[in-house]
Structures are given as structure tokens and as C-alpha cells.
Amino acid sequence: MDKIKQNSPVLFYFNHSKKWLAKISKKDSLHTHIGVIKHSDAIGKEYGSRLVTNKDKYVYLLKPTMYDYVMKIQHGTQIVYPKDIGYIIARAGIQSGQKILEIGTGSGSLTSCIASIVKPRGHVYTFDVDENFMKIAEKNIEKAGVSKYVTQHNQDLKIAKKMPLKDMDVALIDLGDPWVVIPQVREMLKGSGSIFAICPTMNQLEKLTMALVENEFTDIESTEHILRTIEAREGKTRHSFQGIGHTTYLCFARKAFFGRKSKKSSSKTTKSVSKTSKKTTKTTKTTKTTKKTAKKASKKTS
């Protein structure tokens, strides 16, 4: 039986739109419109139990999932939503033990989710240039309990002369101009390594796709994911009038080797062989001419 203790994380759930995420502390209380929730009342109870507030409202004590952490984190920037994160994980085949490169930490929502997948043997290396956002992300990553599996770097990879990482399994890019770092990402990825870029607009997708082709990426795919919630109630089930609409476009690709260098080399070899062949032909013609001349000279002499 998983019981709630001091410092245990708890999601106080009233309904879909009214829920609060907190770390249990004996001295703390949560003051809400449905009444006061005392943390001490939760200690010793099993997850899934319920408390009654001073206004006779039921609150359920739920164990937070990574989804809850993502939806409740402090927003320094626009976050990547779970509906998009889920597809990223599935399409890129992210799993425990992998090394993940992230460019653009933001608020750390994607960072936290990916770290929870690759742990305990894997690691996320995330880069950002804004120290204020990095501090917010650090707190969010710590709240999600995955700090041990994340290393934050305050570095601009756009201007880096030497890449700090190599043999990465997956690269995640959340920048306004993702196409700028594609050459750098390619250098750090394994062969067939996956890349996912977060693009708010279609114009970004166009520029990004051109850069991916130029830098020898294949299996390029751009998608948008819309999540529709349903209000399921007896006799009046319908879709919800509220919900998250467009969040972002996702662009996926894999590192490949187009053989462009070998083609150039092959072309040079062909030209060289052609030149050698021409020289040989000229030499043969010269030899034949010399023989004819020698024959004519011999007849005249006789």
C-alpha cells in the first residue's frame, strides 16, 4: 500500500479544471474556493483516498503523473504539450538508456518528460542561452524528480566552433530558427539518429525541410496533432466546448548518408579514366601512323 508521507507529492483533485499539485508539509494548508485543505490530514492516507474540506467538499488524493507535472509547471515560455510529447516519444522511438540532445530548454516540460523515459541509464543534455528561463526550467525539472538525469548547458550552439557532444540517439529542437542548427545537430547525431523540431508556423517548416535535405536527412515528416476531449455523461454525451487547439507543428527526420562525396569521387575517377583512354587512343593512332610511314620509306628505298 502506497501511503502519503511528509514531502510526498500529491495532486488534490476536485474536478477536471480544479486540481492542485503540492508537496506535503505538516504545517501547510491549501486555501481554495471549496474550502481549506490541510496537508496534515493527508499524511498516512493511501493514494486515491479523499478528504473533506471545511465546506463539505470532497478532494481526492492522487499520485501525480508526468502529465500532471507538465500541465502544472511554471511557464517561462510556451510549453510543449503532452499530446505532442507522446507522438515525439513514439515516432522517435525514445527509450531507457538513450542519450538525448535538446536545443531550447524553455520551461523544461519536454525535458522532464523525456528524462522520465530515458532514466535510469539514459540522459538528457539540454542547451539554452537565456539564464532566466534556465532557472525556471531547473525548478520545474527538480519538481518532476528527474534532475539526476538532466544536464543543463548555457551555450549557443549556433556559434559553437566545436560540438560538445557526439553519438546522440535523438535531437530535439525548440527554436524560432531551427534550420540554423541542423549542421551542428548532424555532427552530434548517430547514423540514422532521429531529429524532432517544434515549429509554430508553416513557414518555419518550409525552411527547416530545405535545410534537412541539404544536410542529408531522410524520412522527413511534418505533422499537427489535435486533441479533442469528450464530455461523457448519461444521456448527453458531446464533445467539449473548451480545449487546446493548435499548439505546434512537428517535423521529424533521420540522419542518413546520401553518398554525395562518393559520387563526386566517382565522377573524378570517371573523368580520369576517360582522359587516360583518350591518351591511349592518341598513342595507338600515333603508332599506326609511324608504322605506315616506315612501310612507305621501305618501298621507296627498294
Image (cartoon, rainbow, N blue to C red):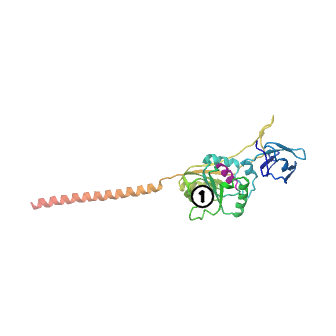
Helix or strand or loop: what does disc 1 sit on? helix
Q: Quadrant of the N terminus?
A: top right
* Residue 173, position as x, y percentages in the image: 63, 56
Q: Quadrant of residue 229?
A: top right
Which residue shows up at 55% across the image and 53% down it? 190
Q: Is 90 one of the magenta-colored residues? A: no
Q: Is residue 256 visible?
A: yes
Q: Name the foreground residue: 142 vs 26.
A: 26
**Residue for badge 1:** 179
Q: Main secondary structure of the magenta part?
A: helix
Mark 1 is surrounded, within 10 Å at the Cα level, by few (under 14), some (14 to 19) or many (20 or more) other residues, namely: many
Q: Name the foreground residue: 165 vs 269.
A: 165
**Region in magenta:** 108-117
Q: Name the foreground residue: 96 vs 46.
A: 46
Relative to 273, say whether 234 is above or below: above
Q: Amino acid at mark 1?
A: Trp
Q: Is 154 on the left-hand or right-hand side of 296?
A: right
Q: Is 290 on the left-hand or right-hand side of 227?
A: left
* Residue 242, position as x, y percentages in the image: 78, 46
Q: Quadrant of residue 58?
A: top right
Q: Is 215 on the left-hand or right-hand side of 127?
A: left
Which residue shows up at 70% across the image and 64% down it? 131
* Residue 302, position as x, y percentages in the image: 9, 60
* Residue 51, position as x, y percentages in the image: 85, 44
Q: Is 109 one of the magenta-colored residues? A: yes
